[in-house]
Amino acid sequence: MSARVTTLPSGLAVVTDAMPELGTAAVGVTFGAGARAEREDEHGLAHLLEHMAFKGTARRSALAIAEEIEQVGGDLNAATGVEQTSYSARALAADVGLALDILADIVTEPAFDPEELKREQGVIVQEIGAVEDTPDDLVFDLLQETAFPDQPLGRSILGTPKTVRGLDRDKLSGFLARGYRAGAGVVTAAGAVEHDRVVEDVARLFARLPEGAGETPAPAVYRGGDLRRDKRDLEQIHVAIAFEGRPYDAPDAYAAQVFANLAGGGMSSRLFQEVRERRGLAYSVHAFHWGYADAGLFGAYAALGPQDAAEILPVLLDVLVGAAEDATEREVARAKAQMKAGLLMSLEQPTARADHHARHQLAHGRPLDPDEIVAKIEAVDVDAARAAGARMLATPYTLSALGPTRKLLSAERLAERLGPRRRPAA
């Protein structure tokens, strides 16, 4: 991969990755100001700002933004994450300048029209309602909230109807001013792009970004806990059990991900084979590991019928603990192959490349070459994978469950099974 980086005098990084065989390009601007950057009275603000950026600027109406990019066959998108917010566009090679112009416009001079704000608050409240009606999404929001209580990392990205309705233009402007800064941002372009031309356009179009870096969020504190919502109207139980994971720059971060993959990352994984194939307990089951700047979350999820509720948690725990004790070299090799293939296959698309470079530039101060990542994956051996799993499983547990949960192993029995060292903080 031929990523090139230029840092402008303002502190804004520009990363390009030319793919000469393509006739299209993906461009984006990303800031290290996601939901975790919100203050106590700003729950849902980062996501609301992402929506409002498309609702008109000093130069363009909401309709004009959509028409200009679609007139040339392009498209716009955006995403709010826990630690980053990104805005992106796809366009033909000849229209990269226009795409950058629109992106710069929406992140530097959004209008925050009061009528548009009111309408978009209503849209987001509907989006929150949709998540409440989607238990396989909601269970993970509840898991994060239970693992990291009373802190930004534990709050849902969308906010609540009450908090979203309480946000106003001043709060949007304040978050924009402190989070969307040159030193906290990166502009990426991949595909049919020329580095020097992109740098020239970015220097001119993003000149209005204030200099300086964004605020550093308060340290995350993993605590764990047990949250169950007994919802008799659901036909399935959705259950997720988790433990403290590893930050993305921890020495054993790749080992933790390898362990998660071998435990429950595919059809040949231990969880899939034991829970679905051998026992028929659940249609959907998998393991996961999420790394953040200073925290992480590792665990397993399953969706199953209430008749199997009593069995699921003991089985999930037995599989995870067993993998930490006796994972094989063959399982580790298979997990590493899945990770490498997933990475390299995704980077065949310019949008994925642009996103890849943005995330790593903000997280590590430079784009990581795929060969470097592959080497770190390859360096994980069976002992490292087992050790990472054992370390995570030795921490207090977090449980979230939705549905007819009465027959699940009780919190008391679960704590007894795991032992006193792994009980959540009181």
Image (cartoon, grey):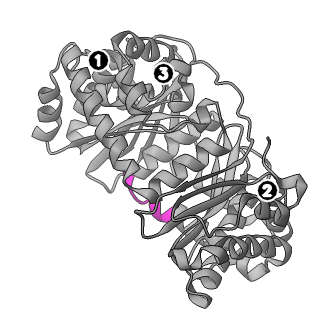
Please check the rendered image and state whether residue 347 is part of the magenta-colored stretch, yes or no.
yes
Q: Which mark is residue 42?
A: 3
**Residue 336 visible in rendering:** no
Residue, far bottom? 278
Say which label, 3 or 1, has the lower sequence index. Answer: 3
Q: Position of residue 24 (x, y in %)?
A: 27, 49
Q: Which residues are magenta?
A: 344-350
Residue indicated by mark 1: 110
Q: Amino acid at mark 3?
A: Glu
Tell me how far mark 3 sits from mark 1, CA to CA.
18 Å
Q: Quadrant of residue 425?
A: top right
Compared across the picture, whether 255 is left or right of 187 comes to right
Say which label, 2 or 1, has the lower sequence index. Answer: 1
Does residue 327 sit above or below 104 in this rendering?
below
Q: Which mark is residue 392?
A: 2
Say which label, 2 or 3, has the lower sequence index. Answer: 3
Instruction: Please name whichever residue, 369 or 300, is drawn nearer the observer in this view of the structure.
Output: 300
Give the mark toward the camera: 2 or 1: 2
Kindly state the secondary structure of the residue where label 3 is placed: helix
Packing grade of label 1 (10 A; few <14, some 14-19, many >=20) is: many
Q: Amino acid at mark 2?
A: Met
